[in-house]
Image: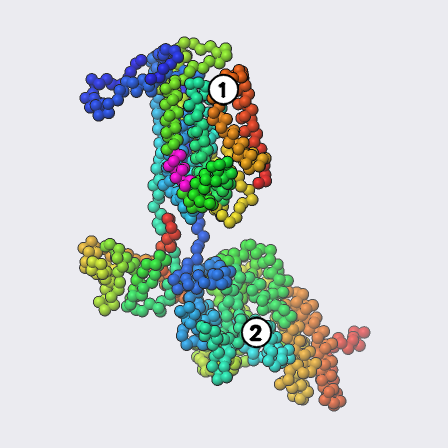
Amino acid sequence: MGTKDTETTSPDARADDNDTNDSRRSFLAKMSITVGVALGYGLLAAEGLLFVIPKKIKPPTIKIYAGRLKQFTLGGVRTLFDLNGREILVKRDDSGLTAFSSVCPHLGCTVHWEADKNRFFCPCHGGVFRPDGVAIAGPPADAGQRLSEFPIEVDKTSKVVYLEVKEPERGRS
Amino acid sequence: MSLNVKRWIVAALSFLLLVALLLVAYRQSERKLIEKREIPIVTSESKSCVNCHKNDSPSLVKEWEESNHAKVGIGCAECHSAKEGEIDAWKHEGTYISALVTPLDCAQCHEKEYKEFANSPHARAGEIYAGLDNVLAEKVEGMPGNNAASVNGCVQCHGSIIKFERDEKGKVLRIGPQRQPSIDPATWPNSGMGRLNPDGSKGSCHACHSRHAFQAKVARSPETCGKCHMGPEHPQLEIYNESKHGIAFDANRGRMDLDKRGDWVLGRDYSAAPTCATCHISSFLSAQGLIEGGSHDVGRRISWTLLPVVSTKMNRVIYKDGYKEDYPEAKELPEIGDKVMTKEYVVENEKLVSKQVPRVVEDIMTWDDKRENMIGVCLNCHNDTFVDNFYEQFDNLVSLYNDKFAKPAQDIMNKLEADGIIDPKVPFQKNVQWAFWELWHFEGRRARQGASMMGPNYAQWSGMYEVSKQFYTKFLPSVIEAAAEKGPKMEGKYRKIVAEYLSRPEHKWIEGKSPEEK
Amino acid sequence: MKSKLPTREKSGLLHKLNEMIPVNWEILKEAGAEPVPHHLQKWWFCLGGTVLYLFIIQVITGIALTFYYVPSTNEAYQSVARITQEVRFGWFIRSLNKWSANFLIVAVMLHMLRVYFTGAYRHPRQINWLIGFLLFCLMLGFGFTGYSLIYEQQSFWGATVATNLVQSLPLLGPMLAYFMRGGAEVGANTLTRFFVLHVGVLPTLSFLLIFLHILLIRLHGVTELYFEGEVVSEEERFFRFIPDHITSELMVGVLLLYFLTILALIFPAGLGAPANPGVTPTHIKPEWYFYFNYRVLKLASLHVSVVATLFFGVVIFFWPFIEEFLQKKFRVPDVLSIIIGIVGFLVFLLFTVWESFASQL
């Protein structure tokens, strides 16, 4: 392999690292080239890595009009929908309004409110939740889970209710 | 090139590369996510409306998408939904809706503004039906079966009474496959300020807050007010444009932050110039540094009434249920807590009727209180001496008009009526009635309003000059003329009455110089 | 030749490894440590290596971009916008890909010029020339398909014009165009096709051809080259591949990356209006490396210009054989090749520059 027109000769004439002076110089040179290249390409690799790892952005939320306060009966639960069509269960009690996600924290089935039993119930595996959202029976209770909540507020002057939900999903976001 | 040299070169180049990559990292950290345009939210209730109407009336839907309503998901359903059984409701594509959106509908969310607006002079604009203007439009200008002057003119600003077309039995006519109630076309479309709605509410919010984008900058622009507050009998827009306020506005439109979302406060959000809304409605930073809240009650800051024949200062009585009544200065004010019989105009059987309603007084606002409200705005730019002196200038012109021309003319007209020379049931029959009408309704108002809003040309040449010209060259001669029709005795009587007025110091000039002055 | 590798006796582990992978390390080491003829120290001989380096950059940045790019007509533009605006260093990776592409094609052209003017295509190296020219065409294909993937107006309409040109090729034209587009018009199929070409077919072919190209170079070896009157001492005739030549390559590599980064900072890749099949923009222009063809197209009729370009390409492709034929048959002097080369390149340059200054469509 590698035939040449003329015989190969040792290119030792080029080697600078025979003398001690030169070996120090060449050591420094070797060091600086190693460090330089490592840093340069290293930073490039780091930036490339950051590129392929998407940053965790909190999904943007938006406040939407959710009706007026008088549409929510005291002690009752009203079902609203978020912008992706999922149910949100809004409970009104003496302390105000609470908006619960209807997604069961166990495996994601839809929870519903049972007024006669004053509880939230998940039909998939029999998960039971208190009116404040804490699970008290079934798999979610075993895992110490609770229904997650959405921020909900009532404007003082107009009594308009605003619910903060995730922006509608638009394809691959 | 030796190997070591090469190595150093590579090291140096790597360093350069490092610097460049650091710049890249810096550039990256400076990047912010592009601000996303707020997208309109179409809720499930309004989705079917939008999907159809975006083809039927694309710009209407596009304008709604621009609105702040769309940003929070308030769509068609929230404003246009109606209850079964309401006179203007019908079932459209599965839901009950009404084309009419009244202040009560807006009050679902904007209750504060509704309370302020109701019973304000704006909401009462429709009560013009009770006045002389109505006679002019319907009888003098219009003809039986065709009231177009009123329909296209007066009520487009003042507001119509919404009426429905009925069958022979008097039931509301419902037309089309959806059984849509048929509104009398003479009464709708109409977005007059004092529109009298079938649900009992007065007014229409979209007179100023034009739909469907409901842009704040439209409501705050003088041009919006100018749709109605212009013209020969109340040229407020023209006066404003002539005045320094209007000039400042025109030059500084870009600095006014007209489209600001939420409260728009003079002294905090803008300072370049006042618009109509600034002085008459909007919030301002008071001298104490507090924000004085605005109010949709446009009568809150008005101390004079410049509309009638003789101007008077206006006090205000506010009743427990929120009803407000204006009391001319001369009328004795009740005490707080008194039960008073108030006069209220309501619509019954699609006609404006006056009712007597007992109410309890909750608060009294004197004309001085109201003036102080207005002065709070003025003090943002002008000091108190400036403001007080201005009010003295203004008050004096109103008094001049009152004392020299209005009161004498009114007095003469009262006498003519008493003598049966003119019939109040037949206004505009005689020249003197026209001359009097124009004197106070046109020239007189222009003069007074010109002074009120610092429009010197309107105060003088389009104002007092024309008042005096009307008075001397048209009104007084027409008095004699009208009296003469009743015979020489009447003529003589009125010649004497007129002469008596003309001998007063302010009118004496007409007789030439006094012997002393010669 | 000195060997620096540990011998088999030294380490039992290495011995075991060597039994698993029975390669003769000695021969490999020798193959890799080829002494380099001294003329290769001249910078314009590094152009081939430059092309390879830039190609590697393209592969790496290209793969990275594929993490976020979506080859669907609905989402392509959006995904590019996302990469440019939202993804961390997305603008940087994309700009590197764009500028590296441009540099790559310039480097390929310069490399071809160097090879041409040093006569390195002559016997026995004709096949390498063929492979090289094919690689050049592949790089042009990369540029064309890559630009179309952005799916902005120029992407769409450029693809439309290009496929229409292909359509007018004699005999195979319409079939070829139909295949390229995946249909009668540029659309969804076209985009997915171009994507497959850009990230699958062309890279695979390129890897293969690059491998063959380098293999042939190593098999043939590099002839010593002396310029007229040049005197080279015995010691200077050759230098070591490692570490000398490698360091030179590193020099060039770091310098290139530095330039690319600076360009990415100052002239980052942008985004035009999204592709709109209903609206043709007033100015459609291909990428600069196609300006030559575009200009020829404007000067002559469609068929003439397509055939002319094809002819040009064929001549370049078969040039080693053509030259040999001319030299044998007509005894033309060597200098004729030089002249033809200069003239050909100047014509190319002229047309390219002309097109770049032409303001109207």
Q: Mark 1 — residue?
A: C325
- Point out residue B200 in the picture as x, y percentages from the top left corner: 46, 76
Under tag 2, what secondary structure?
helix
| Marks 2 and 1 in Cβ contact (< 8 Å) | no
Q: Residues within 10 Å of mark 2 (few under 14, many from 20)?
A: many
Q: Name the side, left or right, on which C17 lies relative to C310.
A: left
Q: Mark 2 — residue?
A: B155
* Same chain for the residues under marks 2 and 1 in the image: no
Against B307, residue A40 (above or below) is above
User: Which residue is at a point 53% across and 17% down the rendered structure image?
Assistant: C330
Residue C194: say if magenta.
yes
Specify start and end residues of the magenta stretch as a single range: C193-203
Residue C180: say if magenta.
no
Q: Residues within 10 Å of mark 1 (few under 14, many from 20)?
A: few
Q: How many marks?
A: 2
Q: Chain of mark 1?
A: C
Q: CA distance from mark 2 to mark 1?
A: 99 Å
Q: Main secondary structure of the magenta part?
A: helix
Q: Which of these two is toward me, A17 or A156?
A: A17
**Quadrant containing the N terminus of chain B in the rendered view:** top left
- Point out residue C239 in the picture as x, y percentages from the top left corner: 38, 15
Q: Which of these two is toward me, B92 or B35?
A: B92
Under tag 1, what secondary structure?
helix
